[in-house]
Amino acid sequence: MNNTEKLKKSVAFALDYAKTRGADQCEMALSHSTGLDVTARNADVETVEFTQDKGLGVTVFLGKQKATAGSSDTSQEAIKSTVDKAIEIAQHMQADEYAGLPEQSELATQFKDLDLFHPWDLSFDKAIEMAVELEQLACKQDIRIKQCDGAHVVSHTGTHVYGNSMGFLHASQSTRQSLSCVLIAEEDGKMQRDYWYDCKRDALDLFSIEKIAEIAAQRTTRRLNAKSIKTQKSPVVFDASTAAGLLSSFISAISGGALYRKSSFLCDHLNKQVFAPHINIQEDPFVLKGLGSGNYDAEGVRTQQRDIVKDGVLQGYVLSSYSARRLGMQTTGNAGGVHNLMITPGEHDLTGLLQTMDKGLYITELMGQGVNIITGDYSRGATGFWVENGQIQYPVEGITVAGNLRDMFKNITAVGKDIDDRGNIITGSILLSEMMIAGS
Amino acid sequence: MTNLIEQAKHILLEPTGITDTALSQVMGHLLGKQIDQADLYFQATMQESWSLEDGQVKDASFNIDKGVGIRAISGEKTGFSYADDIIVPSLEQAAKAARSIAHSGHDASVKIAQRQANVPALYPDINPLDSISKQDKINILQQVDSIARNSDPRVKEVMATLAGSYEVVLVITQDGTFAADVRPLVRLNVRVIVEQEGRREQGSAGGGGRGAYDLVATPDTFRAYTEEAVRQALLNLEAVDAPAGTMPVVLGPGWPGVLLHEAVGHGLEGDFNRKGSSAFANSMNEQVASPLVTIVDDGTLPGRRGSLSIDDEGNQTQCTTLIENGILKNYMQDELNARLMGMQATGNGRRESYAHLPMPRMTNTYMLAGKSDPNEIISSVKKGIYAVNFAGGQVDITSGKFVFSTSEAYLIENGKVTTPVKGATLIGNGPEAMRKVSMVGNDLALDKGIGVCGKAGQSVPVGVGQPTLKVDELIVGGTQ
């Protein structure tokens, strides 16, 4: 019996055991992952970490009373005591009329091969060799590179099993490979740090170490001699990686938990204009090799390809079965989050987007947690470049950009086709017509 | 300590039948000629969390995590492996993997002995999860709900979480000595949402520390947290858009010390300075802040959230003066970085769990009191911001840039605190901001005990604090 079958058997055992202990409903997730994480610095290996994580989480329902328990020990004895603990706590809980598993009809029944499993035949020595080579290549890119603050080669393989008392029991296997390089450049006694990385299901799809080294060096050295700019209103371009953060705030604001607590500025905005009319946002859980791909969500509910925003109008929320019941709606298969959120790219690449902006701020990094989902108020530290005549003039740091997400979403004038697909939110750069910049 | 070692062995090793002889063998496999430092870190953690929403406690979770982290260091190189099965074959395998960092060498011989170190415990060796009954936990949360709802009709949602953890740690270092710790940790968080004429705002408050639930669960304490959350939320209903631009900022006492944590603290962690990646690197004994500024990292405050009797490398924690009258005096060090820099470890080697590598981390970091009357500080500002509460911060230790987000702040106009302003990000450069500290109050306060610090993907509980202080220039990221 292979490992996956063993894990499935453990989940089936837990579900049976919970039933004998009086649980009306039960669900359990069991995961097992192993990995190798190598870091190089100063032309040599710095750390080698062998990771292996196991964990189980079980939720039991006694009628409408619910509790969750978890353990890093996945032995049969530990499974029993974890279920016992969940039942013991559930007995003390107050009934929640909305508690429970999804409807049987909502559970996934089709399991496409999403091509998420590509183990990397990466020996310990080979990983070290790659990390050191990446570090050395990066340091050689520019004389202003003072040092590499870590070149990483990481490979993870995981098995995740989810089962519930409605007969759902499924395992999925996936891999995640990544390369990254953090650099420090120095000029006139001032240092700047930046990095680049790639992350894919399949090591064959990763950027070459040469490319990672080159981009990391370019991103780091171009930040040298950054200055502040004066306080003003200006158009801004969020580069693709910061634009993903902007869309992630949008997802938080249309997520069930924020909606049923009425703690989102997008409450009651279904079928209303939320973005500029040219904006279209889709969710596609079935992208082959996608980092957010999956046939079912964290409750076993089937995921779906759908429009979230069409012509700027909000088409649907991001709901689990619980939040859906609270809102009197249906689950959207998003317990645990979205699966490959994609904004439709426009006609321009980044250069074209900066030309369209003509004069303004090009943001490449944001700092801090200044996003208030209740009010939409947005204020974050920013790093980037000042642009005039569509051309980058000089690096900028020590400023903030502020606005309200309500206006910001409507003020999107263009989306770039410079797609960043290294995460679950896939977008190009985004041009906004106006934000408030605070500086010197 | 001996008693704690026995307790830790009883919980971590006895159920698995691992003897001192077996440990000696594992350590022997781990060590070899080229290994400078090695440790075995056994840990068991039990955590629970009880949450209230809609006036009902209907969500609770309980988690157990147990395992061993095995580390071998050769020069600057670290090999690390961990296992969540505390059994001899897993230990042996992990030890071999960790030692693979050094390519050759023979097993060494190690005799495991007990250390009779006399480290005073800073908190009781109890399991806080058992300190009150389940029904009491539920009652406390329900009282929080009714206090909040009865305090003002504009309170629409109340969310409260009572959480506790019980952690038992046993560290065995390369010379065969043991160190152990039993670490209770509790907290209570309250968040309320208020509504007035269609406008919704939130406020949150809470507290915690190392000890039993009575640290947060006496009627006076939970009432105070709840009233504070409601007060903040109602205040935000009146808040106007924050100004944008450079201006003087007066920071209130206590939790605003998160500024120091971000602007200075991270930049003084040993690893960043050894690697030369901190904006404070190579500045030892230099003036890096205003002469009014003295900052310490103190892991020895009894019962505080950031405190530890011993760190995760088995070293006793201490009060380390980082900056004294503006002059850089010391870094926070773990064993690895201290050794490579030729300095002393300061008891700041911390790790999130057995599955993470230790690194230099803060404990309770705060600025000592100065001489100014807080009112005098505020009245010295013609136009600026008075920030008394923050949602969190972040720093780029290399450029020194830091940000933090206000959750309660006011305009100062002609020396008087006037209108509350909406949350805004403050941004500055750590070393520059510290030089611009022009007044320091006599009202040092520490935070309430809910801080979490993240570094390289690892979260650990920390404390912060400061007196009221004035920074002559920071950028305020408002919209007006």
Image: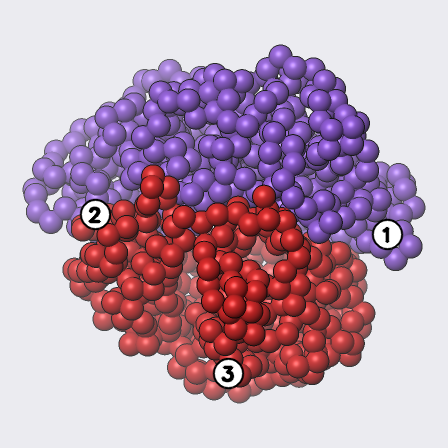
Chain colours: A red, B purple
Question: Quick one: B368 or A305, which is closer to the camera?
Answer: B368
Q: Outermost residue, top direction? A: B371
Disc 2 and disc 3 on one polypeptide chain? yes
Label 3 near label 2: C-beta < 8 Å?
no
* Residue A352 picture location, percent across and down: 50, 76
| Front of the two marks 2 and 3 | 2
- Whichever of callouts 2 and 3 sits on the residue coming sooner in the sequence is 2
- Under mark 2, the amino acid is Asn
Image quarter of residue B414: top right
Q: Residues within 10 Å of mark 3 (few under 14, many from 20)?
A: many
| Badge 2 element | loop
Mark 1 highlights which residue? B195
Image quarter of residue B373: top right
Q: With A60 as the anchor, is B239 left or right in this view? A: right
Which mark identifies residue A42?
Answer: 2
- Under mark 1, the amino acid is Glu
| Badge 1 element | strand
Q: Outermost residue, front direction? A: A389
Q: How crowded is mark 2: few (under 14 residues within 10 Å), some or many (20 or more)?
A: some
**Point 76% across, 42% down: residue:** B421
A259 vs B188: above or below: below
